[in-house]
Image: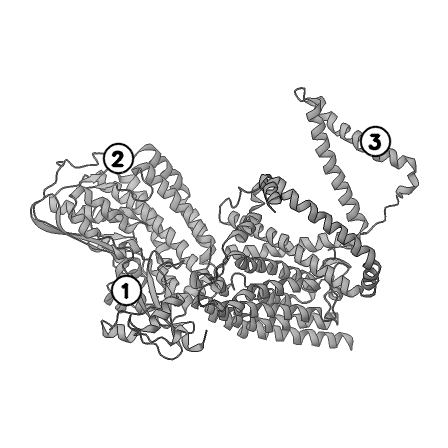
Amino acid sequence: MTVVGRTWDRLTLPGKVLAVVVPLGAIVTVGLGLFVALLGAGIVRFLGDNLPLVRFVAAATAVLVLTIPSAFLIIYLELKVIALMNLRYGPDRVGPFGAAQSVAHGLKVLSKEDFTPTGADVPVFTMAPVVVFLSSVMSLLVLPFAPGLFGQDFNIGLLYFFAMGGLTVVGLLMAGWSSFNKYSLLGGLRSAAQVVSYEIPLTLSVAGILILAGTMSLNQIVIDQSGSFLDWFVFKQPLAFVIFFIAVTAEANRTPFDMAEADQELVAGFATEYSGMRFGFFFFAEYVNVFIVSGLTVALFFGGWNAPIAWPWPVTVGLDPGSLGLGLLALIALGPPALIVALALPFWLTNSRLPFWQALVIGFVLFNLVAVAAFLGLAFLSFDWVVGIVWFMLKAYAFVFVFIWMRGTLPRIRIDQLMGFAWKWLLPAALLNLFVTALAVIVVKS
Amino acid sequence: MPASQTPYDIPAHASTDDPRVTLDRQLGVFEPIPPYPPRTEREAEFYTLADGQMFVNMGPQHPSTHGVLRIVLKLDGEKVVDLDPVLGYLHRGVEKLCENADYHQAICYTDPLEYVSSLFMEWSPVMAFEKLLDVTVPRRAEYIRVLSGELLRIASHALYMGWFALDLGGITPILWSFIERDEIVDMLAALTGQRLLFNYYRIGGVNGDLNHEFLSRLGAWMSRATEQIESNQGLINANEIFVRRARGLGAVDRETALRMCWTGPNLRASGVPFDVRRAHPYSVYPELAFDIPTREEGDSLARYLLRMDEIRQSLRIIDQCLHEMPDGPVMAKLPRLLRPRPGRAYAAIEGPRGQLATYAISDGSDQPFRMRIHDPSFIHLQSVGLLTPGNLIADTMAIMASLDPVMGGVDK
C-alpha cells in the first residue's frame, strides 16, 4: 500500500489523470468488444424487429439534443433583435457579434448555486422544471420538419401536441405552488387560468383545418397544403390563423400575454425562487416553446416544408462517381491542391506585398468555403428533405422574429382584459369560423 | 410540512414572544407583522386578515417600485383590498443637514432629493435664500435658469413616458425616452460639468455663463426635438393595449385632487389649471408666452398625455429664452460669507412633478436656523392608498408610476 501510495503522490496531475483514464479505457474497450461479440447479433435482431421503437428512441434523443442549440439561437436572436429595436448594441463581447452569448448564459446558469428555499415542497419544487422542459420538448416529436423527417407520425398528432402544451401548465402550477412564495403562487395560478382559457379558442380555431384536411396528423396536414402558396391553409382560414396566433402567443406565455412572469408585478412569477440550472430549464423551455409554436403555425397554416412555388426539385444529378475509375483517384488527389492554388493565385498576383504562403492560406479557406457551398448546393438539389427543412426553418424563424418583435413593441395586457378577450372575442370568432367552414364544406360537397 | 404550520395560520397580531413567530423566522418567511400591540386603530384594522385575504410585500427590493418604497398589499386573489405604504428607506435627514451647513453648502444637500430633475431642487432653496438676503438676480442668470430648468423638465417628462410604459410591461419606450434624456443631460453636463446632480444654481445667479458646446448642442437638438419626441411617443400613444390599460386607471376628480393637496401635472390632469409659474409668478416667467395645458379626465392616461403637452410648451419657452436672453453678468455681487438678517422666507417653484417649495428661517448666523422642504412626490404618493384599492395587483405599480413620485424627495 505504501509503495502504491508513494508512487501515486509522486505523479503530476496529468500523470494521475492518465493513470486513471488509460486502465479505465482499456477495461471499457474490452468490455464493449466482448458485449458486442456475445450479444451483438441478438441486439441487432431485436432492434430490427422493433423499428418503431428504435425510431422513437432515436427521434427523442435527437430532439432532446437539438432543442438546446435551437433555444440558444433564439435567446441570442431575442437579445440582439430587441437590442436593435431598443437602439442598443446588445451582446457583442462573447464570440463574433456576441453569437456565443447564450452559450455563456448556459454556462453561467450551470455554475450557479442551485438554491432551494426553506419551506419549499422539495420534491415538487425539483420536479417542476423537468415537467415544464419535457412537456415542451415532447411536443417537438410530432412536428414535421421535412418530408420523412419527423419523430412520430401520430394520427392524433395535433391532439397530442395540445395535450403536451397543456402539460406545461401543470409544471408552472407545481413551480408556483411549491416555491413557498406568494409571487410564485400568483404567477402559477395566473398561467393556469390563462392557458385553460386560451386552450379553447386555440383548439376551436384549428377545428376548421381538421374539417378541410380530414386528419389530425400534422404530416398529413402539411402534405395537404402542397402545391403553390395559394394552397396554404392561411388563405382558406384567415380568421382561424388570427385566432390561432393570438391564442398560441398566450399559450407560450409571450408578450403581451406574459402574465405568469410579469416582472413589473410579480418579480419573476413562478420562477422567482428558482436559480441555477432549474431556472435554466424554465428559460430553455420558454424559448423551445417559441420555436415549437412557430413551427406549429407554419405546419398548420403556412404549408410546413412546402416551397411557396412548386419548383422542379429534387433533381437527380446524373454523375456516377464509380464510372470515373482511376480518374476519381486522380480527382481526389489533385483536385483540391489545384483548386487551392487556382484560388490563391489571383491574390498573390494582385498584391505584391503578400507572401505566397499567405496567399495559399487564403486559397485554402476559400476552397473550403467553395467545397462546403458546393456540397450543400448539391444536397439541396438532390434531397427533398434538405429543401424541406430549409423552407421549414425559414418560415419558422420568420415567426420567431414576429414573437420577438411583439415582445419589443407591446406592453402587457391586464389579466381581466386577457380573460375578457379570450371569452368574449376569440371564442365567438372561433365558433363562427368553425360554422362557416363546416357550411362551406357541406355546400361544396353537395 | 403539516398544514397547521403554514404561515397563513399565523395571526396578524402575533407578539415577538409567540412561538409561531419563531417558527415563522425559522421558515424564512417574512410576514408583515406590525409592532405588537398595534399602535393605531388603522394599524389594527389593516393587519387583520379576513377570510381568503393575504398580504404581499411589494418592495423595497421589488423591481418596479420607483426607488426604495415598500408597500404592504392586502390582496383578495389578484385584487388589492387595502395597502400600507412603508416609507423611510431612503431617509437621510436632509433638512437637518442643511441646517448645519452654510447657505452655499445647503444647495448640494437638496440637490439629490429630486435626482431625476435635480436643478429644480436647487432652484427653490436658492430662491428662498435670495429672498432672505434680499438679492436681485441678474436678468441673464434668470433666463439661464429658466432655460436649463425647462430643458430638464423635458428630460424628466420624457423619462416619465418610458417609466410609465415600462410599468405597463413595454420594454422599448424606456430606452427610446433616453434618447431625449441623454441628449439633454449631456448638454447640461457641458454647461454645468455634471450629468445627474448639477449643482449649478447659486445664490444670486448661476455658476458660469452659457458656453459654446452647450449652445451648439442645444441648437442641433432643438431643430429636431419636436419631431423626435412625437415619433417616440408614437409607439405608445397609438397602442391599443397601452391606452386601454391607462384609460380610467386611478381616476381622480377635481375636488379629491384639491383635497389631497395635489399640484403640478397631476392636478392639471384633473382639470384645475393651477401652475405656480402663472399663479405665483417668479423669475422671468411673466415675460414668456406659454399655455397651461389641462385635461378633464383625471386618469392615468390624462396624466401621461398632459405631460406630453407640457413638453411642447417647454420647447416654446426654450425657444423664447434663446431669442430674448439679454447680455450681462450671470452672478450678483455677494460676499463670500452670507449672513442674512433674521427673518423667514418661502419660495415655491413649479417642478416637473408639482410645487416644490422651501421655507427657510434665518437667525442671523451663516447657517439657516430651520429649513423645510415641501416635496410634491410625497404629497402624490399619499394618494396611492386612495387610488389603488379595488384595482388589480398589476395596476398598483401603474398607478404609482402615473403619479410620478421620486423617492429621494419622499423620504428626504
Residue A118, by quadrant, is bottom left
Q: Secondary structure at mark 2?
A: loop
Residue at the extreme top: A352
Residue identified by numbered label 3: A334
Q: Between residue B210 and residue A396, name the one nearer to us.
A: A396
Residue at 73% of width from left, 27% of height from top? A344
Q: How much space separates mark 2 and mark 3, taking CA atoms?
A: 78 Å
- At 71% from the left and 62% from the top, the residue drawn is A232
Residue B278 position within the rendered picture, expressed as x and y whole percent measured from the top left? 23, 54
> Dot 3: within a 10 Å radius of its alpha carbon, few (fewer than 14), some, or many (20 or more) residues?
few
Q: Which mark is residue B382?
A: 1
Q: Numbered disc 3: what chain?
A: A
Indicate left or right for A366 with B263 as reference.
Answer: right
Marks 1 & 2, CB-CB < 8 Å contact:
no
Determine whether the residue tagged by mark 1 lies in a helix, strand or loop: helix
Image coordinates of residue A346 in percent, x first then y, are 73, 26
Above/below status of A380 relative to A157: above
Circle 2 residue:
B209
In the image, taking residue A72 as reference, residue A176 lies left or right, namely left
Which residue occupies 59% across, 71% down?
Answer: A199
The image quarter containing residue B75 is bottom left
